[in-house]
Amino acid sequence: MQSTADNVDPAEVAKFAALAQSWWDPKGPSRPLHELNPVRLRYVQRLADLGGREVCDVGCGGGILAESMARSGAHVLGIDMAQAVLDVATLHALEAGIAVEYRRIAAETLAQERPAAFDLVTCMEMLEHVPDPAASLAALATLVKPGGDVIVSTLNRNARAFAVAIVGAEYIARILPRGTHDYLKFIRPAELARWGRDAGLELEDLTGISYNPLTRAFRLSNDVGVNYLAHFRRTGSPPVPTPATAVPTPAPGATG
């Protein structure tokens, strides 16, 4: 096992590893990921040509997005720290006849091993689950080639996001397991943009993801108040990241 110096929270890894066997069940606990995947893929395709490109999907889980990008012509490496979900991802890709490579490795470690190796790096709903999200974003910047694209998704930190993503999704509608998210780890767009600049990334676009609980449908929108996607382009040459240290936790009730 790699240590927490890799910017990994073992409790978070265990949480998602417990969902491994149901990851590809479209009616199981990972149903929101299946419903959200077409929206994410559409956003990626709108901003980056996938045909023949080298792509790294960081925090790939069971491979839902990774497989979709591979079907679109990309050469995809999916990385995650939960071996159980990687085993499921590998088996599913094999059964589907889709060529995707999977590795159990932290983004910071891969960045030291393969700097500037990818045309596109994606990281969906992972930054709010690591001890130091700024270090993770710096690793993504190191992995992508100069002029390449980094696309991430995460949750805004404000009262509405708490009400929708935690109270609504985990306790009322129960479309996510309780304890999936920690509000204090949600990330304001301004924070994300600052971390990107520090890592040599220029923020090109912010797009919200809206959800209709009646139709269980996600769509891209101009509302970044809850769930949002961010598109960065690498403009600088960030240093290879060093082992992460924890960042201060925002004060309870902070909004933005």
Image (cartoon, rainbow, N blue to C red):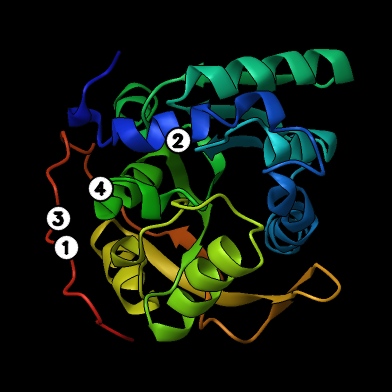
Which quadrant of the figure has residue 35?
A: bottom right
Q: Which disc is residue 247 wearing?
A: 3
Whichever of callouts 1 and 4 sits on the residue coming sooner in the sequence is: 4
Residue 119 against residue 70 in the figure, above or below: below
CA neighbours of label 2 inside 10 A, class few (<14), some (14 to 19), many (20+): some
Q: Which disc is residue 131 wearing?
A: none
- Determine which residue is flagged by label 4: 135
Residues tagged 1 and 3 counted as in contact (Cβ below 8 A)? yes
- Determine which residue is flagged by label 2: 15
Residue 247 against residue 120 in the figure, above or below: below
Q: Is residue 6 left or right of residue 65?
A: left
Q: Which disc is residue 249 wearing?
A: 1
Dot 4: element: helix
Residue 252 against residue 178 in the figure, above or below: below
Q: Which residue is drawn at 32% across and 56% down?
A: 236
Q: For marks 4 and 3, give the CA distance.
A: 9 Å
**Which residue type does callout 2 highlight?**
Lys
User: Which mark lies nearer to you, 1 or 4?
Assistant: 1
Residues tagged 1 and 4 counted as in contact (Cβ below 8 A)? no
Q: For marks 2 and 3, give the CA distance.
A: 22 Å
**Which residue type does callout 4 highlight?**
Ala
CA neighbours of label 3 inside 10 A, class few (<14), some (14 to 19), many (20+): few
Residues tagged 1 and 2 counted as in contact (Cβ below 8 A)? no
